[in-house]
Amino acid sequence: MYLHGTSRINGQGHLEIGGCDTTQLVKQYGTPLYVYDEESIRVKCCAFHRAFKESGFSYQVAYASKAFLCMEMCRVAREENMSLDVVSGGELYTALQAGFPASRIHFHGNNKTEEEIVMALQANIGCFVVDNFFELEVLHDLAMQHGKFVNILIRVTPGVEAHTHEYITTG
């Protein structure tokens, strides 16, 4: 069995993550329980930065908050000089409350509400990722109403159809 990062099987045959016995964690906190190893996360962040620095390219490495987001994850991402991809007003709120630099936040998601867009505009986030012409028009109108200039990244879809709902069609 291959264990990642600081994970290991201890002398009692229990899984340890980051030096913590998971059996003891379950006794203390119950289940379900999500355990993240901060050291392993930091090592991965550094590996991405190192790879790009060696290339000589201008770059940003972004943590996808849809994987898991809390105040502590924002702190680690901020300290490791990561950018942050958010896909909802809740994720944006969490990032801002954690003191994550708005200039390093990218707002993804193809179903942003006007309220979420305004929240992001007021926070002066770094970039909006736009998935469709309707969203581009809404973003333009709201940015003009609020006197904001925004950076956008446009996702172009190659015509792959989901045959479900138009909001989930991506490339």
Image (cartoon, helix red, strand yellow):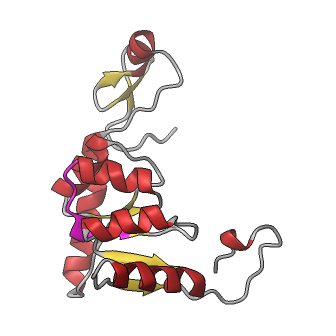
Task: Spot the residue most to the front.
Answer: 145
**Residue 92's spot in the image, x, y percent?**
36, 56
Relative to residue 44, is residue 79 drawn left or right?
left
Is any atom of residue 132 visible in this view? no
Question: Image quadrant of residue 131?
Answer: bottom right
Q: Residue at x 40, y 76 (%)?
A: 128
Q: Is residue 104 magenta?
A: yes
Task: Spot the residue most to the top.
Answer: 27
Give the camera-side residue of 64 and 42: 64
Q: Residue at x 47, y 26 (%)?
A: 33
Give the camera-side residue of 135 and 159: 135
Give the camera-side residue of 65 and 141: 141
**The C terminus is located in which quarter?**
bottom right
Q: Is residue 69 magenta?
A: no
Question: Image quadrant of residue 168?
Answer: bottom right
Task: Spot the residue most to the right.
Answer: 163
Relative to residue 9, is residue 56 drawn left or right?
left
Give the camera-side residue of 147 and 157: 147
**Residue 98's spot in the image, x, y percent?**
23, 47
Is any atom of residue 160 visible in this view? yes
**Residue 5's spot in the image, x, y percent?**
34, 43
Question: Image quadrant of residue 65?
Answer: bottom left
| 10 shown above or below 115 | above
Q: Residue at x 57, y 88 (%)?
A: 156
Q: Residue at x 69, y 75 (%)?
A: 169
| Highlighted range, magenta | 98-106
How many marks on residues?
A: 0
| 77 shown above or below 28 | below
